[in-house]
Structure formats: structure tokens, C-alpha cells
Image (cartoon, helix red, strand yellow):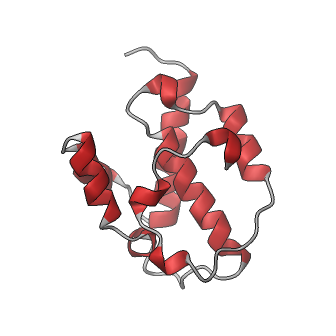
Amino acid sequence: MEVNEKCDVYSFGVLALEVIMGKHPGDLLSSLSSSSSSSSTLTAQGIFLKDILDQRLLPPRNEAVEQVVVVAKLAFVCLHTTPLSRPTMQQVAMILSKQRPTLQNQFFMITLGQLFDINCSSS
């Protein structure tokens, strides 16, 4: 394995998920990657984002909703199995610094499958 910036990006993805989940995402990542990519997407479609968040905390509200969604999307993009498909840390920083409208009404319906394969430049 070559150690480079894409490894750092992957580590950022793991850490980001760990922060919003309140635990290491190893089991989640294993269940998503243990099947083929098509069935992995189906598995992810059946898991709601709200269900993987740290249950010790109240659900996010107001502007925190969009921030949680953005962090989750970024985490999954950073964890892409193909290193060349991962964003750079500069792209991650730019995405995190953007202002966005809130998704409060849609939050409880967001599945993990909807968070996969976002276009980093349009998030």
C-alpha cells in the first residue's frame, strides 16, 4: 500500500463517521463493503442516516441538519474504494466552508445510499 494524500483523505472519512456515529464505523463499513457494489447500494438505501447517528445525542436541528448531511456525504466520498475517486483535502475544506440552506423537513428520510457518490464540486 502506498501512503499518500488519498490515505489521509480515507482516514478523514473514517474519523468523520466516527464523530457523527459516536463509535468506530467498522461494522457499518464492513456491511456496506462485504457485498457487491450493486447490493451494497441497495443495503445503503435501506439504512437511514438518522439511524447511524450517535443515539446518545438529540437529533440535529436547524442549521446542524445540513452540516451533519454534508459531513456524512463527505465521509462516504472520502471512503471510496478507488483512491483516485476520493477528493483532495483541499476539496474537502472547500465543501465544509460553503453555506447551505437547511434540510430540516427532509432529514429523517435521508438514506445512506443517497449520500454515496456525490460530486465534490457541487456539494
Residue 48 lies, with reference to residue 23, above or below; the image says: below
Q: Image check: 66 left or right of 35?
A: right
Residue at 46% across / 59% down in the picture? Answer: 114
User: Residue lying furthest top in this view?
Assistant: 2
Residue 32 lies, with reference to residue 21, above or below; the image says: above
How many discs mark residues in the rendered view?
Answer: 0
- Quarter of the image where the N terminus is located: top left
Q: Image check: 85 left or right of 93?
A: left
Asked whether residue 64 appears in the rendered view, the answer is yes
Q: Which of 41/6 is in front?
A: 41
Report x, y in % for residue 22: 45, 66
Q: Image check: 103 left or right of 9?
A: right
Q: Which of 14/102 is in front?
A: 102
Residue at 71% across / 74% down in the picture? Answer: 102
Residue at 60% across / 83% down in the picture? Answer: 105
Report x, y in % for residue 33: 26, 44
User: Residue lying furthest left in this view?
Assistant: 35
Asked whether residue 7 appears in the rendered view, the answer is no
Residue at 31% across / 51% down in the picture? Answer: 41
| Location of residue 2 (image quadrant) | top left
Report x, y in % for residue 103: 65, 74
Residue 78 lies, with reference to residue 32, above or below; the image says: above
| Location of residue 90 (image quadrant) | top right
Report x, y in % for residue 75: 51, 49
